[in-house]
Image (cartoon, rainbow, N blue to C red):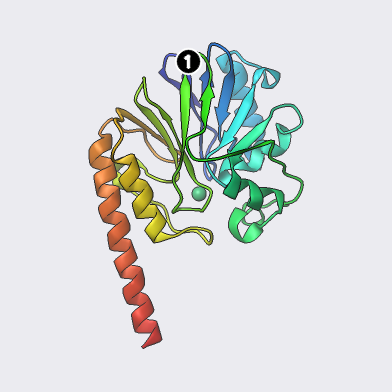
């Protein structure tokens, strides 16, 4: 299932537990953000074709982080399309670090994936009419990125922040401190449209991020209190 959210920006949902994928058809490049789970590749491919593109016409796949529900279908794309992700995500993916990746939990082998380009904070990907700024936003995982289009005021947030300020769990490569800091950085940006990796999109972004910061702080407190009780 897909929707055109803005001209040349498509949201593709292939079904749970896969993440939401986003397809941007730029003047100069076509980019898929997150390929979703391994098992849903055929559905993803069909949706991309319905939008009017073949898999061969994809120029880049960007993964928002190192979880199998976001990069699993790279297996079917990586021989023809360059794969890019943050370097902390890349290190886990290429070394099949399944404690973080959770491929086996999604029913497949974690080995055999590769990454062509390792991103750093503030890298830019210029698609012509779309200008994607990469923000390293660790917290949910160490390699989480958010992708910001400053002229269109759009943020693709992966699992860092969802509509209503819902936040993710802290995975085994994540940190509450980094999570709060990443959200505080996102809170300084002008964002009109939030496109998260799961759930619905949001146009109430400032409030969502404010709520997300409160949620992250509260969850951190709860986590510390649980620890205290356990260690007592
Ligand atoms: Zn995740």
Which residue lies under the disc numbered 1?
Answer: 8
User: Looking at the image, which residue is at 28% across and 35% down?
Assistant: 205
User: Looking at the image, which residue is at 36% across and 42% down?
Assistant: 162
Q: In this rendering, would 23 be left or right of 60?
A: left
- Give the percent coordinates (x, y) of residue 198: 44, 41
Q: In this rendering, would 197 be left or right of 86?
A: left
Frontmost residue, 199 versus 24: 24
- Give the percent coordinates (x, y) of residue 177: 38, 59
- Give the percent coordinates (x, y) of residue 76: 72, 34
User: Looking at the image, which residue is at 62% across and 35% down?
Assistant: 84
- Give the percent coordinates (x, y) of residue 227: 38, 77
Above or below, 44 against 220 in this view is above
Label 1: few (<14), some (14–19) or many (≥20) C-alpha neighbours in 10 Å = some
Above or below, 137 against 147 in this view is below
Quadrant of the rendered structure where residue 83 is?
A: top right
User: Looking at the image, which residue is at 57% across and 24% down?
Assistant: 31
Can residue 220 be seen at all in this image of the molecule?
A: yes
Above or below, 231 against 2 in this view is below
Q: Quadrant of the C terminus?
A: bottom left
SS for dot 1: loop
Does the beta carbon of the residue at mark 1 sit less than 8 Å from ligand 1?
no
């Amino acid at each position: 299932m897909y929707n055109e959210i803005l001209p040349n920006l498509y949201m593709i949902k292939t079904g749970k537990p896969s993440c939401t994928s986003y397809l941007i058809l730029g003047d100069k490049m076509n980019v898929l953000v997150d390929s979703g789970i391994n098992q849903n590749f055929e559905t993803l491919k069909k949706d991309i074709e319905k939008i009017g593109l073949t898999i061969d016409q994809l120029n880049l796949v960007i993964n928002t982080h190192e979880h199998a529900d976001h990069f699993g279908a790279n297996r079917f794309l990586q021989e023809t399309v360059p794969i890019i992700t943050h370097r902390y995500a890349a290190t886990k993916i290429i070394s099949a670090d399944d404690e973080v990746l959770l491929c086996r939990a999604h029913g497949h082998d974690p080995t055999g994936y590769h990454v062509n380009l390792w991103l750093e904070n503030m890298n830019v990907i210029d698609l012509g009419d779309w200008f994607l700024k990469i923000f390293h936003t660790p917290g949910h995982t160490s390699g989480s990125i958010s992708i910001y289009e400053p002229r269109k005021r759009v943020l693709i947030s992966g699992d860092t922040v969802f509509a209503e300020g819902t936040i993710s769990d802290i995975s085994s490569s994540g940190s509450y401190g980094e999570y709060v800091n990443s959200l505080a950085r996102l809170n300084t940006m002008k964002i009109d449209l939030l496109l998260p990796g799961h759930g619905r999109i949001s146009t109430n972004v400032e409030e969502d991020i404010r709520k997300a910061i409160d949620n992250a702080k509260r969850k951190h407190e709860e986590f510390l209190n649980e620890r205290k009780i356990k260690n007592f």
